[in-house]
Image (cartoon, rainbow, N blue to C red):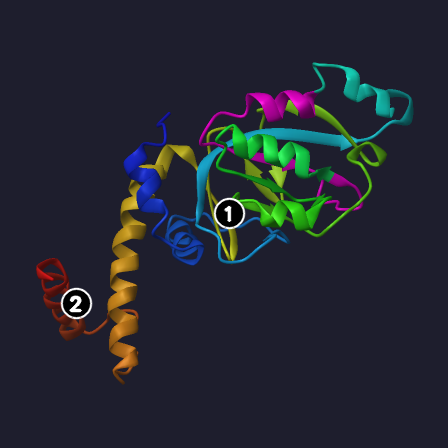
Amino acid sequence: MNTLSTSTRNKLKTVSTATIATCLFKRGLRNQFIQNVQPLKLGKPTMVGEAFTLRYIPAREDLNPISIFRDPKHPQRVAVEECPEGSVLVIDSRNNARAASAGSILVTRLMVRGVAGIVTDGGFRDCAEIAALDFPSYHQRPSAPTNLTLHQALDINVPIGCGDVAVFPGDVLVGDDDGIMVIPQEIINEVTDECVEMTIFEDFVLEKVAEGQTIIGLYPPTNEASLAQFQEWKKLQKNR
């Protein structure tokens, strides 16, 4: 297993989830975009981190009273305290936002501990407070009821489903204003390098399109002249 290096993390912060989606699609991975999940606030820096997971199951009333939070080993509380610095806490809330996955106190604790972000396919309570934090947070929609009314925290750092995507511990999540992509850990370095190169080419294409050039033969680059033009453009960028 690879670990997410500082270099790879920084490179991923420069690419979009759309570019990552295309790169993974070319490798046959078609279901890596977490569905029905969005940032609480647009315009925040790109979120990048390895997945640290928490799994909820349907709550059973006799096992899930509010007093359960007094247990220092409660899985939700343990996940908040053990999610590693630089990782993303990913919560399997069964694609159900009728009860909150977490609130502002737990999210603030994650931020202070140096976690890279939080993602749930459920909802958050205290959404205005969470949105105001300097911390990437993604959910389905606001939800005031405590998670205990619907969810029972069970497992930490196991394979989960989040937004209809399989997320394994250590997979790399990249989140921007469009949403979140999940990159298998085993291919993270090669995907990152390809996405960086794709982003450079897309910057070139945007510049040429803005100048009035047709996309035919340019995007995708089926015209050899377009590829030669791109290589010359790259040289100019390096010399600036």
Distance CA(mark 1)–CA(mark 2): 30 Å
Query: Is label 1 in a helix, a strand or a loop?
Result: loop
Question: Where, by quadrant of the figure, is residue 133 drawn?
Answer: top right
Relative to 217, is 171 on the left or the right?
right
Amino acid type at mark 1: Gln
Relative to 234, is 198 on the left or the right?
right
For the point 59% across and 49% down, the residue is 132
In the picture shown, does residue 41 fall above or below 81?
below
- For the residue pair 206 and 198, the one nearer the viewer reads as 206
Q: How far across and down, in percent of the image, does residue 230 sit?
A: 16, 67
Query: Is label 2 in a helix, a strand or a loop?
Result: helix
Q: Residues within 10 Å of mark 1 (few under 14, many from 20)?
A: many
Amino acid type at mark 2: Phe
Residue 77: within the magenta?
Answer: yes
Identify the residue at the far right of this view: 62
Identify the residue at the far bottom of this view: 212
Q: Mark 1, mark 2: which one is toward the viewer? A: 2
Q: Which residues are magenta?
A: 75-100
Q: Residues within 10 Å of mark 2 (few under 14, many from 20)?
A: some
Q: On the image, numbered disc 2 is attached to which residue? A: 230
Residue 165: within the magenta?
Answer: no
In the picture shown, does residue 212 fall above or below 223?
below
* Badge number at residue 32: 1
For the point 36% across and 27% down, the residue is 3
Q: How far across and down, in percent of the image, does residue 195 sit?
A: 32, 51
- The quarter in which the N terminus is drawn is top left
- For the residue pair 53 and 44, the one nearer the viewer reads as 44
For the point 57% across and 48% down, the residue is 34
Q: Which is nearer the N-term, disc 1 or disc 2? A: 1
Q: How far across and down, in percent of the image, does residue 111 sit?
A: 54, 34
